[in-house]
Amino acid sequence: MDDTPVKDLTEKEAARALAQLAMDITFHNARYHGEDDPAISDAAFDALVRRNEAIETRFPHLIRKDSPSRQVGAKASSKFAKVQHRVRMLSLGNAFNEEDVTEFLARIRRFLKADEDTQIALMAEPKIDGLSISLRYEDGALVQAATRGDGSEGEDVTANIRTIEEIPQTLVGDVPAVCEIRGEIYMSKADFTALNERQIAEEKSAFANPRNAAAGSLRQLDPSITASRPLKFFAYAWGDMSALPFAAHSEALEWLENLGFPTNPLSKRCNSVADLLSVYKHIEIVRGELEYDIDGVVYKVDDLALQDRLGFVAKAPRWAIAHKFPAEKAITVLLGIDIQVGRTGALTPVAKLEPVTVGGVVVSNATLHNEDEIARKDVRIGDHVRIQRAGDVIPQVIEPLLEKRPKGAQPFEYPTHCPVCGSEAVREDGEVVRRCTGGLICNAQVVERLKHFVSRRAFDIEGLGSKHIAAFHEDGLVQSPADIFRIKVQRGALDGKEGWGDQSIDNLISAIEERRTIALDRFLFGLGIRHVGEVTARDLAKAFETLGAIEDIARSEGGAEALSDVDGIGTVVAEAIVAFFHEPQNRAVVDDLRSELTIEPYKNEQTGSTFEGQTLVFTGSLEQLSRAEAKSQAEKLGAKVSGSVSSKTSLVIAGPGAGSKLKKAEELGVEVIDEEEWIRRTAGSLN
Ligand code: IVH
């Protein structure tokens, strides 16, 4: 590769270089993807791609039609190997005020049946604004580092992590054979400023904030780039461990520190809500002087045995919460209000703003929630508005500044028809949202459903982002989700399309083929059934294991009731599922997909307990355990908990005051035990 600095190239040289790079990159791409026989290292390949990018940034008018930067999915450089986390990487629930923190602790007490006099120790520590990482050590040696990804599957960034000085390559001493150490990778504020100055000097784009800079630096295919970026680390958690050499979070932090991991010096042990709040206030005061960005304080129950009893709800632990710092605010002008149509037809107003920096990020869109909010706040186009942005939450419009209202500004008239298909948009009783009634005749809904289908948490097809799927829909190539799996028979339709070359089409097709086999929960989530998010999709998959079973139940008489028996599924959700599977258009979409795909049944974890696969019912009051803890124990043992007794019930646990359910169990001859007996039977198998 010619290594004349990009800034010294003449226009002629740049054009020649781009032509050469287009040829070289195409060639190496083919060797890498097509023939699986790369001729150069990933690092050398990346260097080519980067040089191409740099020249194009400087001479945008020279960008070639066949430029590698225009080839979708051709970037071998966007490939990191996937890593399955052996222990899921969870996120945290949020608290925004003192009340939320009080409720967090009250909830813990209720779950544990612990009264006010029982002291529950907690740790308070800064919430570092970086990206989480899991470091796997085997026999003391660092063997793998993975990003969080979706919590179950992350990306292998081992080579890059090895360049970070603060992370030990080996653990010295008597450590468990397997140790997964987790924590946050971040960039200090000073290093971020210096990096951006360098980027600008080199005519590269600047990063919006230290977190983006850290993420961008870690996700480099060329580890030598990561090495040139000063990344740091704080350890605060762990995943898969062959043994636990500590019994409390505070002890874990000490243990980590002794092994040479940086731990945060502001972490403190607390004994009450008042203690937690005083640590919060202290951290909030010193926040500005810290070398790194933080966006709140995390509270964690200290005792690991209690953590274990408390367990998890959906994707976050019951034993921890993030107390966020208040949002940052700014004032700007409302230029317009766009009405977007979502995949369920919901109309959402989006504020178009004069770009303004809020807490280090440039904001030009903000949510206005819904039509009632616009009316309540009386926000008018042309107004100066106060907006706020909190951490990772979408920016919001708080209020207009009335004293600055331009003359003649009119109240906003919310549309009564879909701005995309023109169908009537209606608000059902008790709903705040107005919805387009066009269903699948509404292009916006069709496209949004397709985008959802291919999104990261659903089918996650590499190289097929929302822009591509929208273009494919517009071209008539993809009308319904199953069409994606027929693209390969229509590849001729892609040939010659702008941005698509032979190689990128091949890449796309192989990425699609990889997803022809799909896990049931991802599939269900991908369908975009109203109210069925990732967690509900997983609950459904867990409870019914196959798509056929879910369809059968949804179409059977009393389907909604049976569905709402499943833990985590309420009546509204159950009704939405039933409605979805009754609608002929949806049935056709599902059947069409079934003919293209292999949908893997959900494999419930084998716990080896005698309760595995059983359906249990708790009734009456429990004295030692809270209802929530009893239920969580049953689930840990692989049992399902149901709210009603039927012939499918395996066991009823009845306490004082049990009534009709106990009677029904007796009539049906279902075994009934009391709380004492439940505790005795489960004692050995919990933990
Ligand atoms: S504990 C099971 N502690 O916050 C709980 N997380 O919103 C695991 N984070 O994904 C997280 N500082 O990336 C924990 N002291 C801290 C943290 C922290 C930052 C991040 C982490 C996590 C996210 C959750």
Image (cartoon, rainbow, N blue to C red):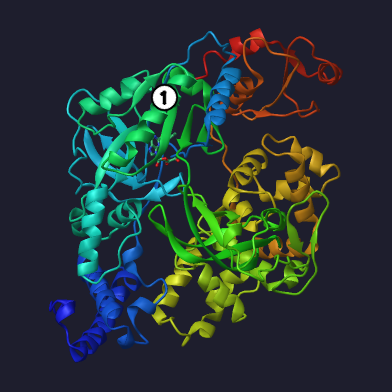
Looking at the image, residue 504 lies above or below residue 621: below
Q: Badge 1: how crowded within 10 Å, few (<14), some, or many (20+)? A: some
Looking at the image, residue 414 lies above or below residue 165: below
- Specify the amino acid type for callout 1: Ser
Residue, disc 1: 278
Q: Tag 1, which secondary structure?
A: helix
Residue 83 shows in this picture? yes
Q: Looking at the picture, how far across and down is residue 104, in whole percent?
A: 55, 27
Q: Which residue is located at x 37 percent, y 87 percent?
A: 65
Q: Looking at the picture, how far across and down is residue 632, in whole percent?
A: 59, 25
Residue nearest the observer in this picture, 414 or 14: 414
Q: Looking at the picture, how far across and down is residue 545, in whole percent?
A: 64, 43
Q: Which residue is located at x 62 percent, y 65 percent?
A: 448
Q: Looking at the picture, how far across and down is residue 663, in whole percent?
A: 85, 16
Residue nearest the observer in this picture, 674 or 399: 399
- Image position of 62 (left or right of 592): left
